[in-house]
């Protein structure tokens, strides 16, 4: 579990705790308070799950873009390296042929 996941879990836990305490000290009967707590927990759980899934999707797309860019750069570097190698090879052949 990385730092961001731990932070998210801690934040959601603290938020739920604060809401629960606020509802428990509110002047409502127990049955109504439990119902409100259940609804809030379900809402927060659903929202957290949706945000997590959206973030995961965005990170996957970003990783794919970075990978594509990286592979394009590698291909460009390979092409330039091959061109330089060919150029050096031709120059070496020319020097060897001129000195022979």
Image (cartoon, helix red, strand yellow):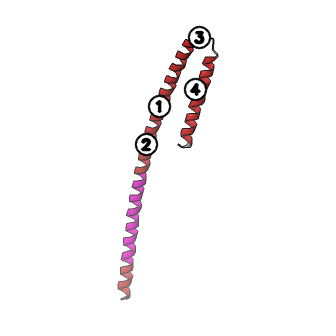
How packed mark 3 is, by other alpha carbons closer than 10 Å (few <14, some 14-19, many 20 or more), is few
Figure quadrant of the C terminus: bottom left
Query: Which residue position holds label 3?
Result: 29
| Foreground pick, 31 / 73 | 31
Mark 2 to mark 3 CA distance (whole Å): 46 Å
Lower position in the chain sequence, tag 4 or tag 3: 4
- Of marks 1 and 3, the one in the foreground: 3
Q: Nearer the viewer, mark 2 or mark 1?
A: 1
Distance CA(mark 2)–CA(mark 1): 16 Å
Residue 49 shown left or right of residue 98 in the figure:
right
Determine whether the residue tagged by mark 4 lies in a helix, strand or loop.
helix
Quarter holding residue 9 = top right
Q: Which residue occupies 39% across, 82% down?
A: 95
Please give the range of residues in magenta. 69-91
Residue placed under numbered mark 4 in the picture: 16
Upstream in sequence: badge 4 or badge 1: 4
Q: Nearer the viewer, mark 4 or mark 1?
A: 4
Q: Nearer the viewer, mark 4 or mark 2?
A: 4
Find disc 2 in the rendering and name its residue: 60
**Looking at the image, residue 45 lies above or below residue 70:** above
What SS does tag 1 mark? helix
Query: In the structure shown, which secondary structural element does the residue marked by tag 3 occupy?
Result: loop
Which disc number belongs to residue 85?
Answer: none
Q: CA distance from mark 4 to mark 1?
A: 15 Å
The mark closer to the camera, 4 or 3, is 3
Q: Quadrant of residue 22?
A: top right
Q: Is residue 31 left or right of residue 86?
A: right
Residue at image coords 58%, 37%? 7
């Amino acid at each position: 579990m990385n730092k961001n996941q731990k932070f998210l879990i801690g934040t959601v836990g603290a938020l739920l705790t604060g809401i629960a305490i606020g509802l428990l000290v509110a002047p409502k009967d127990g049955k109504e308070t439990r119902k409100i707590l259940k609804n809030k927990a379900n809402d927060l759980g659903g929202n957290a799950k949706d945000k997590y899934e959206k973030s995961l999707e965005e990170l996957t797309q970003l990783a794919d873009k970075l990978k594509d860019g990286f592979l394009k750069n590698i291909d460009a570097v390979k092409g330039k390296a091959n061109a330089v190698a060919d150029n050096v090879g031709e120059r070496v052949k020319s020097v060897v042929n001129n000195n022979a």
